[in-house]
Image (cartoon, rainbow, N blue to C red):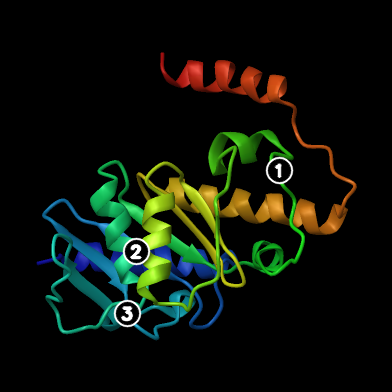
Amino acid sequence: MAKISQIEEFVRQARRVGEAGLTICSSGNLSWRLPDGEVLLSGTGSWVPELTADRVSVCRLDNGEILNGVKPSMESVFHMGVMRERPDVNVVLHFQSPYATAVACMERRPDNFNFTAEMALHVGEEIPMIPYFRPGSPQLAEHVVEAMRTHNSVMLLKHGQVVCGKDFDQAFERAMFFEMGCRIAVLNGSNVNPLTRAEIDDLESYFLGKEGK
């Protein structure tokens, strides 16, 4: 089963999320795929910013079996569902940061969040908007898993956000830039000027092309 050192690292990363203001109290949840077919998840009702080792759930990724007696977050279904569909994903973060959650609750949201290069390159050119479903519901899990088959970031309307990544840093970076983009949207209102298609294409040809070399 999961090593003590792995659980300690998971706790450290959870607290990093809280320190950045991405979650407060019991909002949000975090998961991490381990190499042996197990997954660590924040326990149900746990406070991610103050997570402790005894509130970390260890589960089998293939069937969700709880291995250490700690019940995982009620959103564990979509965490593990995304990982089953995406072998490239090792970390899933559900968060509720201030500005991004404000946007999730807007009646009229921006159609385009590509205000900066970071949004287009890291968060994603398109952010799927998941309709409101009760937190923890099968319908919510189904829609999140479906959207994240082809996207790395999604907005849960009247709820929060989900991002994924190959590791903690990538998921954290996407969450932070997601919040930054939404902060721009809230502070600027309708006075925004997103990147053009040509500007995004230029970014991708330069930055993504360099990464591929």
Q: Amino acid at mark 1?
A: Asn
- Under circle 1, the secondary element is loop
Label 2 packing within 10 angstroms: few (<14), some (14-19), many (20+): many
Q: Amino acid at mark 3?
A: Gly
Q: What x and y, as percent, mark residue 2?
A: 15, 65
Answer left or right for 1 relative to 142.
left
Answer left or right for 90 relative to 146.
left
Q: Please tell me whether residue 73 is drawn above or below residue 92 in the rendered image.
A: below
Quadrant of the snapshot with the N terminus:
bottom left
- Residue designated by label 3: 43
- Measured in 3D between alpha carbons, the distance from the residue under mark 3 to the one under mark 2, in whole angstroms, is 14 Å
Picture quadrant of residue 104: bottom right
Judged from this view, the residue extending furthest toward the right is 191
Choose mark 1 or mark 3, whichever is in front. 1
Label 1 packing within 10 angstroms: few (<14), some (14-19), many (20+): some
- Residue designated by label 2: 78
Q: What is the count of numbered marks?
A: 3
